[in-house]
Image (cartoon, rainbow, N blue to C red):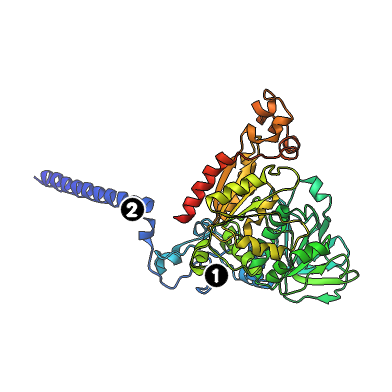
Amino acid sequence: MVTKLRLIRNGNQCRKYRHAAVAAGFFFVAMAFLVVYKPRSLAVPNFGFRASIASPDSGSNMVNGEDHARNSLASGRNDDKQEEAFSENYYISDSKKESGREFKDTTMSNQERIMHVELPIVSNYTAPMQLAAGEAIRRRKPLCDVSDPRVDICEMSGDIRITGNSSSILFIEPPAAARPPEQWRVRPYPRKGDDTCLGGVRQFAVIARGDGPRCTVEHGDVPAVVFSVGGYTGNLFHDFTDLLVPLFVTARPFHGKIQFVVADWKSWWINKYLVVFRKLTDYPLMDLEQQSAGQVHCFKQVVVGLRAHKEFLIDPVRSPNGYSMVDFTRFMRSAFSLERDTLSAANSSHPPRRKPRLMLIARKQSRAFTNVPEIVAMAEELGFEVMVAEAEAGSDLARFARVVNSFDVMVGVHGAGLTNMVFLPANATVVQVVPWGALEWIAMLDFGNPARAMGLRYVQYSIGIEESTLRERYPREHAVFTDPMSFHRRGFAVVRSTFMVRQDVKLDVKRFRELLGKELGHMIQ
């Protein structure tokens, strides 16, 4: 009997152990699920313990995900502030920076922020390194960025010294930097790789070292931009795509508080665009060769070179403050005090409506119209008021800009004269006549894409063989007509000499009339 009772008791205990084992199994499965799929639900209450990584102050720009290191010159931050930020061990998650836009996390609770470990922000300087003596130094990035295919840019903040009539720009390292000497050679003109162009551009040595000549001119907190007006200056298209557009992108964020340091000075060129410079800077331009000879100019911030994106274009994603070609043309109309901002504004301010005005850009050398009187007569029959013009290199640009701004349509063969479209009111029309030779891609690159980016209506007209004077030079079975792309495969120099230098245009006025008629109808609507 006793034996039977012991067997019953042992059986009951086994059943209890089995139930406990099943319960424990469910518990561990549930915990495993939470650990894998909902780890934040396991956060423990805060009992006064602090995270090992100091959380940034709520007023810090780092909390909002703003990376000022990349645009330190534009924002006005100096090295001392950068060092201060890093000395406080501020951190931010990389996931909070997307396409350069600010990201604010509003979904995390205070408790989650305490338990959240984030990665350090990428900056121009690394976090402090502890030396044997307990001393911290900053490791900076290289002074120059030569990765862009169009231009080399050097950006410096600290003690920078520029000696007049010299080709050296010195960055004076702090005594505790303990870095080996650093040297870069750059030509501050955005035509990288074009040896013909850069042959007329001064080369600068940007050097980082521990000492330098004594300062004779202190510029205080005014930053400097160093650039050259050598290269292809004098060609209207290159004046804009190589210098004026990049100058706008580089200097506009400083709102006039910028000193231009000019190499390869050309007085006639500076005077031609003086109204533009006066709009960009509050300070006289510095002639590095003449006015500054023998002087040592000291700055706290310097940019060597100009920011350039694409041919006659601004990339809003890469430009400070999201500047675009619409902003640039608005700036140019303001600089030259032009009356009309948009075509629609002109219609309402001049009742009754006058005839639409058409400017025909007539080149005098290559790619010239050979039947200008016929083109003018045809356009006038359609109802246009027509003017034939071409801006010369030495012409009064301010006067010509006012003339261009009074027109509604600009027509011209591919060439520098079409650059004047920057003075047209928004919504005006640009008609580019493309010579024979499969040049459509060049036409779009130089003027088609820029025109659309400026807020202009763009129309492209490609001529036929019968409209090209090349038929007077070559038989119809020649590769010039049967396989023009074969010339492209031999390089741009061959393309230029064959299709751009030795070709003029006799426009088919009947065919072109159809195009102008459609544009006139569009304007009336």
Q: Residues within 10 Å of mark 1 (few under 14, many from 20)?
A: some
Q: Quadrant of residue 359?
A: bottom right
- Kindly state the secondary structure of the residue where label 1 is placed: loop
Are the two marked residues, 2 and 1, in contact with CB atoms closer than 8 angstroms? no
- Kindly state the secondary structure of the residue where label 2 is placed: helix
Residue 245 visible here: yes
Q: Quadrant of residue 461?
A: top right
Residue 124 visible here: no
- What residue is pinned by disc 1? 61
Of circles 2 and 1, which is in front? 1
104 vs 452, nearest the viewer: 452
Q: Is residue 308 above or below residue 511?
A: below
Place of residue 249 in the rendered image (x, y in percent of width and height, measured from the top left): 65, 61
Q: Is residue 282 above or below residue 331?
A: below
Place of residue 425 in the rendered image (x, y in percent of width and height, measured from the top left): 57, 61
- What residue is pinned by disc 2? 31
Q: Amino acid at mark 1?
A: Asn
**Residue 192 in the figure: left or right of residue 44:** right
Q: Is residue 122 above or below residue 299?
A: above
Q: Amino acid at mark 2?
A: Met
Give the CA separation, mark 2 to mark 1. 38 Å
Residue reaching furthest to the right: 294
Place of residue 275 in the rendered image (x, y in percent of width and height, measured from the top left): 71, 69
**Residue 361 in the figure: left or right of residue 522:** right
Residue reaching furthest to the top: 477
